[in-house]
Amino acid sequence: MNSREQSNRRDFIKNSSAAATVGALALPNITFGKPDSRKLKLGWIGCGGRGSGAINQALTADSNIQLWSIGEAFQDKADAGLERIKKIHPGKVDVDKGRVFVGLDAYKKVIDSGVDVVILTTPPGFRPMHIKAAVDAGKHVFAEKPMATDAPGVRSVMKSIAQAKKQGTSIVDGYVWRWTYAQRDTYKRILGGDIGDIQAIFSCYNNNARKRYPGFGRHNTKSDVEFMVRRWYYFTWLGGDHIVEQAVHSIDKMMWAKNDEVPAYAIANGGRQVRVEEKFGNIYDHFGVEFAWADGTQGYHFSRQMDDCENGVWDRVFGTKAKYTGESGRKLHVFSDKGELKWRWDPGENKERQNNGYQTEHDEMYAAIRDGKPLNTGDRMITTTLTAIMARMAAYTGKKVTKEMALNSQEQLVPDADKLTWDMDFPPKPPRKAGTDAAIAPHKWKV
């Protein structure tokens, strides 16, 4: 890495929030251009559950739009996804058999099929290469969270974000709480000083164990790669571990409260208490993280995926004047330092304020394209992704991991796109044990 690249990365971390104007309701960076009134053709890459939700919301968001092509690693998932969306939007699906692409390279064929917008909802490990290909081709992009599972992926997405800004194409994220009016109203108050100077932030994402893809195992998959891609949630290179894939929503709200400033460092623990079988891959089932920001603010995040435990998704922001509490995106309150209720979010008579963030992220994306002012929410989406990866690194190594160490890590979990094949020799790695893996030990990182 040359000195210029190092300087650019340091500047990115330092100034990642500079693009956001004061107040959480401000729109992300936009590039001005000419209004766009043509029929937009969508390419859908990744036909799983969240992908089915995203394509439904995209087709709902605009009247002059059609699904043109789809890409999926597996034929059965491609067929099922197409049938689902045909039933919901029969008049907006124009996908013939020649535009149903299957395989690890299906994303390239979708992008080359004449689409204007690509919906990226594959396992997150593939996200950087898919974002790069779509941006390089000049397409508008909706990318589900997270945007990478390792530092090389983060750096790749950073470059794509910059390129999209320069060429005036959209990159819109799937961090759903950023798109709900309740959270926007609330975090506008927090960033506006209603609770005073922030001293500490707490979040938790404690949930039941995820039992995904029970029908697939070593007995009915043909290779290491197929086994892992079929059960992607349980392998770090594909999903990032549950702190990066699921609990990242809570980390995203912590980042929002800090105006998207990456913490100076993270110290963490975690492990596997109930995930002891091979079918559950190499991810942990619990994490505990301490974040520290340069101004002295402390952050504490806990996430767990275990059955029969106390569950909850809570956010708390402690300020010098008051405390904010939120529960699963609801029950948003601000209390005084004496425990008196100061403010409660209430839509009042305007029921539209109780919006579905999953829908609004697409509504605003296509409205901006039509106005000739494509949205680019890239800076915030990649800083959140980086912060979650930093926390995972800290838990896996048992070491303090700084933002520079996380961003500049040379550990590459995801194989290069041109090297990834169904039959490659790629046995699943065992779960990480803190302090024992030299590949990501701090002294191996180039800072």
Image: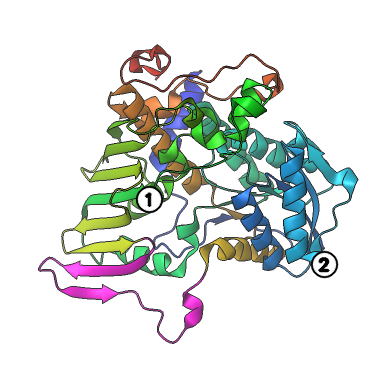
Front one among 231 and 128: 231
Against 196, residue 17 (above or below) is above
The CA distance from mark 1 to mark 2 is 37 Å
The segment highlighted magenta reads: 328-355
- The residue to which callout 1 is attached is 250
Numbered label tally: 2
In the image, what residue occupies the spot 52% across and 23% down? 413
Regarding residue 138, the answer to whether it shows in the image is no
Tell me the tag on residue 91.
2
Q: Position of residue 181 (x, y in %)?
A: 45, 69
Mark 1 is on which residue type?
Answer: Ser
Mark 2 is on which residue type?
Answer: Gly
Q: Position of residue 375 (x, y in %)?
A: 60, 56
Which of the 4 image quarters holds residue 407? top left
Against 41, residue 3 (above or below) is above
In the image, what residue occupies the spot 39% across and 69% down? 185
Q: Nearer the viewer, mark 1 or mark 2?
A: 2
In the image, farthest residue toward the bottom: 349
Q: Position of residue 91 (x, y in %)?
A: 82, 67
Q: Quadrant of the C terminus?
A: top left
